[in-house]
Amino acid sequence: MKKDPIGEIFVTHIWNSGHFVKNNLKAKDGRKIEVLHPGQWNNDAGADFHNASIKIDGRIYTGDVEVHTKVSEWRIHHHDRNPRYNNTILHVSLWDGGINLLAKKQNGEFIPNLILCDYLDGSIGKLLRTINDGKNPCLCSSKVSNMSPESLCAIIDNASLNRLKAKSKAFEEQFESKSEDQVLYEGIMEALGYSKNKRQFRDLAQKAPIESLLGKTPEMIQVILFGVAGLLPKNRKFNKETKEYLNMIFPLWDQSASQFHDKQMSAGEWEFFRLRPDNYPTRRIAGISYILSGCDISVESPLMAMFLSILSDTYDSTSTKALSQKLRAILMPRVSGYWAKYYTFGGKRFKDNQFVIGRYRTDDIIINVVLPATLAYSQKLQDIITKVYNGYPALQDNKITRYFAGRVLREKYHSIINSASRQQGLIHIYKWFCEVQNCDNCPFME
């Protein structure tokens, strides 16, 4: 059966790209609607757009926007029963298809329904071709198309350096109230949580601080982190290997639990839904246990010292590629035992994998955490840190880099964005200008 092209994803593109006449928008109940900011597209669970700013009858609301093909789909999809949608301020649909003037939320509140079909800036067929062909440029794309690669690179490189400095400054400010190791540890932990468990990993790092973990074996670190995280299983009805592992670590937790009795988290706080097994919190906790167990506790700030020793001892004598590989080796320790075979407690056993933290996540941590943090700690290493930063190979594409590839740089993207630092430059421009619709001051428009 051929898939209907006029589905929710099509309407989402219309809302995201602003393919509708902005003047005189009115909701079904007659209230005037003014879109100040459509929000950031959310590819995860919950409403389609977060952090939108909508003026409704003269009053500004900030929150989520949910998009459907028809008004009736709000109830068909059970959003009226789901607390995830209680932050929604506007329900947008292409067609009416229902008699409800308002959409009711789980908390009993009502929000306006906006029907887009009467406000589109082109025919359905034209919009389908525009969106499907990727011909949906930003305001600055015409300027960019006339700029030389050298000019574009200069703008992006400058933005990249500004992002590195801003991140370094943020770490420097944290050093004023916490130890350098604790700050670095929290940064790495937050990055291990990726998007769904970022907050949970930072909370865990604060509840189980680094000084309570350094000098311990990987298994001891694991049991403390699993125990504080609330992830230790309540029963032991597992296969033989899992039982053996639990029988080893539960006595260790009994020795440590009293130290953390008022800091324990709930298992329900952690997200596993729609996560690749490699990204499960259990697997990432196993990863940090091997990183921390490798710290030399005889030196000051042992976690920071591991990275500084590489960046300082090899100054001007090693290529950036070799330095990158040495930094990766710290964050990709080889593991053994239970977590070389499992993603979670009692889950499906898989072929042994010695690396519980993957290459892509490792590279992201180096660029976004390690290099800015070490720069904040030691300005003397600025030249070599900047050298590694500028020479680091490109990371995985994300929604922001794809945004620039499809809507701004277009055919120039792959010839220009050839390093992690230039990807960072695009992220800086997006955060400071695109996300807040500050197009007039965008460096591409100057």
Image: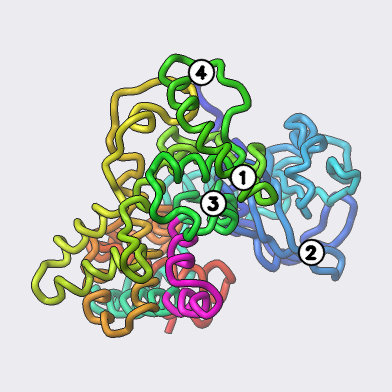
Q: Separation of disc 4 and disc 1 at Cα?
A: 21 Å
Residue 11: give its label.
1
In the picture of the structure, the residue carrying the numbered disc 3 is 201
**Nearer to us: label 4 or label 3:** 3
Q: Separation of disc 2 and disc 3 at Cα?
A: 31 Å
Sort mark 3 into few (<14), some (14-19) or many (20+) by Cα contacts within 10 Å. Answer: many
Viewer-closest of 371 and 210 = 210
Residue 41 seen by the camera = no
- Identify the element where label 2 is drawn: strand
Q: Amino acid at mark 1?
A: Val
> Considering only vertical position in the picture, is 117 above or below 326?
above
The reply to whether the C-beta atoms of the residues labelled 1 and 2 are less than 8 Å apart is no
**Nearer to us: label 2 or label 3:** 3
- Please state the horizontal and vertical placement of residue 349, each as a whole percent of the image: 39, 21
What residue range appears in magenta?
Answer: 168-188
For the point 14% across and 61% down, the residue is 322
**Which comes before the other along the chain, label 1 or label 2?**
1
Viewer-closest of 89 and 294 = 294
Coloured how? rainbow
User: Is residue 286 rendered magenta in the image?
Assistant: no
Q: Quadrant of residue 273?
A: top right
Q: Separation of disc 1 and disc 2 at Cα?
A: 22 Å
**Which comes before the other along the chain, label 4 or label 1?**
4
Residue 1: give its label.
4
Q: Amino acid at mark 4?
A: Met
Q: Quadrant of residue 215?
A: bottom left
**Which comes before the other along the chain, label 4 or label 3?**
4
Q: Amino acid at mark 3?
A: Phe
The reply to whether the C-beta atoms of the residues labelled 3 and 1 are less than 8 Å apart is no
Residue 61: give its label.
2
